[in-house]
Image: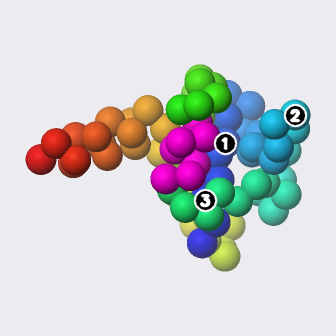
Amino acid sequence: MRTLLRHASTGQYFQSLDMWTPDRDNAYDFGLIGRAMKFARKMRLPNLELILSVDNPEQINKTPFQVFLRKVLRNKRS
């Protein structure tokens, strides 16, 4: 499984600080969800989606980052 960040409006995946790519295979793999979350918070980029990508590209699950973060924070409080 790969952990990616994608800009919801453009569909582009984060590749590096200066580059975004339409190709999921060229996207930067954060490895851990926590790393992707920390990076997204630090960069303060709007409309990011957290992508957990499996080997089969048809099975891409996406969640808007803000929704995901709210759920994580809600679960920590419980």
One can see residue 8 in this view: no
- Whether residue 11 appears in magenta in the rendering, the answer is no
- Whether residue 35 appears in magenta in the rendering, the answer is yes
Determine which residue is flagged by label 1.
Answer: 6
Q: Which residue is found at the position 59% from the left and 31% from the top?
A: 42
Q: Nearer the viewer, mark 2 or mark 1?
A: 2
Helix, strand or loop status at disc 1: strand
Q: How far apart are the alpha carbons under marks 2 and 1?
A: 14 Å
Determine which residue is flagged by label 2.
Answer: 18
Q: Number of numbered discs present? A: 3
Q: Residues within 10 Å of mark 2 (few under 14, many from 20)?
A: few
Q: Which mark is residue 3?
A: 3
- Closer to the chain start, of discs 2 and 1, is 1
Helix, strand or loop status at disc 3: strand
For the record, the magenta segment spans: 34-40
Q: How far apart are the alpha carbons under marks 3 and 1?
A: 10 Å
Q: Nearer the viewer, mark 3 or mark 2?
A: 2
Q: Nearer the viewer, residue 24 or 5?
A: 5
Q: Nearer the viewer, residue 60 or 38?
A: 38
**Amino acid marked by disc 2:** Asp
